[in-house]
Amino acid sequence: MRRFLVIAFAAAFAAALGSAMLELAPSPLDLRIPVAAHLAQSGVSHPVTAVLLNYRGYDTLLEIAVLLLALLGILAVVGKDNPSPPRPAHPVLQTLARLATPSIIVMAVYLLWAGAFRPGGAFQAGALLAAAAVLLHLVGLLPAWSMPRLRLRLGFVIGFVVFLMVSTALLGQGALLKYPAETAGMLILLIESALTLSLALILAGLFLLLSRDQGGA
Amino acid sequence: MSFAFDLLLALALLWSGWRTLTTPRLDQAIVLFIAFGLLMALGWARLSAPDIGLAEAAIGAGLTGALLLDAYGALRQRTEQP
């Protein structure tokens, strides 16, 4: 009886959700037209990158701030003891990781550069670099991170700081993150490069700071 | 041809999502979650949103999967040696 009731409720909810989705009126505001119209002034020719880093740049600014905050939360629970040395994996796996890492780095730089005119960008490039670090850690070539020193801390914050500095410098023009059209492309590339470095370190840190007490498990 | 592929992709997504939630074994659920993430990335690419597909493959399937596997390893180690 109870099972039947649950199934009936679930089916009714699914039907209501489906009908609501079908009745949804088309959006009164078609944002594709203004995005395409101002693409020439945005400094990049890929609309997604233009939205992420120019039209709605402060969304991305807050995104990196949130990730930084998550990392600070992890740093608060990480102890001060030194991590145990990583367990080396099978030599074949190690060689494979050594061979894969340079191509991953080249791919990440390509994604960062390609973000201006085709799918790609700082987030994807950073995630790739972080994946390379995780890979190296899993095969025992990269020890887990203990309490980070000054250099690593600087790496964590540089994306946010560069983004914040650019937006502060542009504040004199009257609006937050309103790039002048002629330097927009260069500013976006500068921000994205810093973001890639920070994102890679933050995402790798989420893994490498937490896996320290298991000896590289 | 592409319709058949899309249909297959949608079915595989639903099936792997269902299996992820209902599998009793944690390690199988994690591997299924990674497979679900990769299929999801394909789905985004089919919906002509390759940007989201790239992010999903790298962060959703790759890093989250690695983190989950790491957490599973830590859990198992803790239960084996109390």
Image: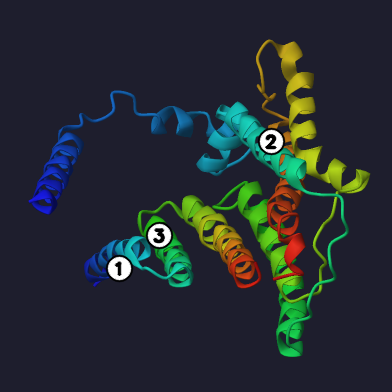
Quarter of the view holding residue A185: top right
The amino acid sitting under disc 1 is Ala
- Observer-nearest residue: B24 or B45? B24
Query: Label 2's element?
Result: helix
- Observer-nearest residue: B21 or A1? A1
Asked if A169 appears above or below A9 in the picture, the reply is above
Tag of residue A69: 2
Chain bearing mark 1: B
Q: How many marks?
A: 3
* Residue A63 seen by the camera: yes
Tag of residue B12: 1
Query: Label 3's element?
Result: helix
Q: Find residue B66 and report its horizontal and vertical position in percent.
A: 60, 64
The residue where tag 3 is placed is: B40
Chain bearing mark 2: A
Chain bearing mark 3: B
The amino acid sitting under disc 3 is Met
Q: Is residue A73 left or right of residue B22?
A: right
Residue at point 79%, 33% (across, down): A162
Q: Is residue B1 left or right of residue A106?
A: left
For the residues bearing labels 1 and 3, Cβ distance under 8 angstroms: no
Quarter of the view holding residue A165: top right
Asked if A171 appears above or below A115 in the picture, the reply is above
The amino acid sitting under disc 2 is Leu
